[in-house]
Amino acid sequence: MLRWSIGVGLAVTVGITLGALMGWYPLVRAMAKPLFEFYRYIPPLAWVPLTVLILGPSLQAAAFIVFVGALPPVVINTWNGVYQVDPILAEAAKTIGAGRLKTLIRVALPVAALSIMSGIRTAVGAGWASLIGAELVGAQSGLGFIIVNSEEAQRPADIVVGMLLIGVIGMLIDFSFRKLSAASTRWLGAEL
Amino acid sequence: MNGNPASVPKLVMRDIDKRFGNVHALTDINVEVHRGEFITIVGPSGCGKTTLLRIAAGLEMPTSGDVLLDGAPAGGPGPKRGMVFQKFALFPHMNVQQNIDFGLELKKVPRDKRREIIAKYLQLLGLESFAETYPRQLSGGMQQRVAIARALVIEPEILLMDEPFAALDAQIRISMQEMLLELVRQTHITTLFVTHSVEEAIYLADKVFVLSQRPAKVARVIEVGQAAEWKQMKFPEAEQAPGFLALKKEVWSLIRH
């Protein structure tokens, strides 16, 4: 769970920052978009061998794989959300003395909050899936590791139990996050 | 800048020409707005009035020509030129008070001073009971009052208004016009106001600039002045004053050509 939290937390922080800059500054978008599109098509699992080679089968390695899997939805949703903010709001902000960055932080990001929230929700699930994937190939503990271990020990029942647990925990995570985001959406929705 | 207020106009638009690709929107436009004046610009639909005002605000650059503020090149948009948009453009995630406060915060006005100023403008625009309300809970007229307060609160040199009442229904529109005149009397704010409504242009203005069809030129400048008989009247009497009707006929004949 720690692996997952660190990875998702990082993905949210980095993703919102990167997505916001890409959505707001055409120059950043022009530079970052091709790289990002390229990165997006490398599945998180493909990062595992290199990560384990460099970081060893560690907490950092697992968190990194979670990060890699959870980042794209946060970036894409933040970018789209910010990009779609009505330009007239930015003009209004300019005429009362707000600079471009100030407008991004105080106007565009809050207005894009709903889109960003749904990106985070997707990231939460994607992070969980990548974590299990990472454990399948490169960990000494965790549910994914238990499954692989059971395969070697020829215990199909344990494998199925492991899979069920992964599904149930994934659903629980998503459920609790949905509750959380519904509450904050209600709060935001009252304003927007 | 306050040295010689009488001779240096607040805002000068000199030889403005604007093209969008093949479309020639504005040509040879000269507008001067002096301190404390209320200027309206009226013209046929699609003649480029809004473009002209956006140029005045710095939101759009002219193809050629200059915009001067207090005699100096005006440059990009900023807090010296307050803008009120037809579509209100309030910040949806901020309540009325926060919308008004944002400009003061950007201006780095101390917090307790801000509270005082906000209270004054809420009162001036009849918004006292809506301080905590969010824009989407307000009617169009109320939203536009907030937008006017947001623009005025930072004490711009000039207030630019882009068909601010066009999205409102007729009754609200009239009460907003009366309110605006009253507000101008109290604050002496210099105003440049664009509209397609001939009645609105005449009712509000000290001076009306009538634009022609595209490419728009200034067809005529009509001095109305504070002395006009209907300035002290309300609707519907104001519209029936003989002087008002004569001006209305004059403006219409210019717009039709």
Image (cartoon, coloured by chain):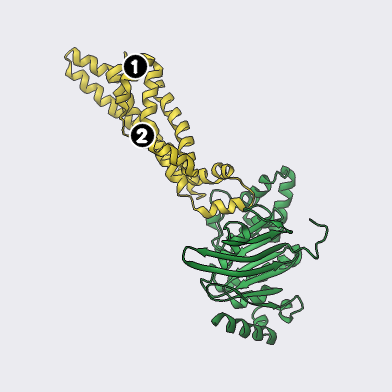
Chain colours: A yellow, B green
**Chain holding disc 1:** A
**Residue type at the position of mark 2:** Asp
Tell me where residue B243 appears, x and y as whole percent. 69, 85
Q: Are marks 2 and 1 on the same chain?
A: yes
Q: Nearer the viewer, residue A91 or B27?
A: B27
Q: Which mark is residue A87?
A: none
Q: Residue at x 66, y 60 (%)?
A: B67
How crowded pointer 1 is (Cα within 10 Å; few <14, some 14-19, many 20+) is rated as some
Disc 2 + disc 1, Cβ < 8 Å = no
Q: Which mark is residue A52?
A: 1
Q: Nearer the viewer, residue B140 or A41?
A: A41
Describe residue B245's horizontal placement relative to residue A7 as left or right. right
**Which mark's residue is nearer the viewer, 2 or 1?**
1
Res A78 seen here: no
Describe residue A122's horizontal placement relative to residue B27 as left or right. left
Q: Quadrant of residue B139?
A: bottom right
Residue corresponding to mark 2: A174
Q: Residue at x 65, y 85 (%)?
A: B245
Q: Quadrant of residue A77?
A: top left
**Chain holding disc 2:** A
Q: CA distance from mark 2 to mark 1?
A: 28 Å
Q: Is residue A186 above or below residue B246?
A: above
Tell me where residue A28 appears, x and y as whole percent. 47, 39
**Residue type at the position of mark 1:** Val
Ranked by sequence position, the earlier of labels 2 and 1 is 1
Q: Secondary structure at mark 1?
A: helix
How crowded pointer 2 is (Cα within 10 Å; few <14, some 14-19, many 20+) is rated as some
Tell me where residue B100 appears, x and y as whole percent. 64, 52
Res B222 seen here: yes
Q: Secondary structure at mark 2?
A: helix
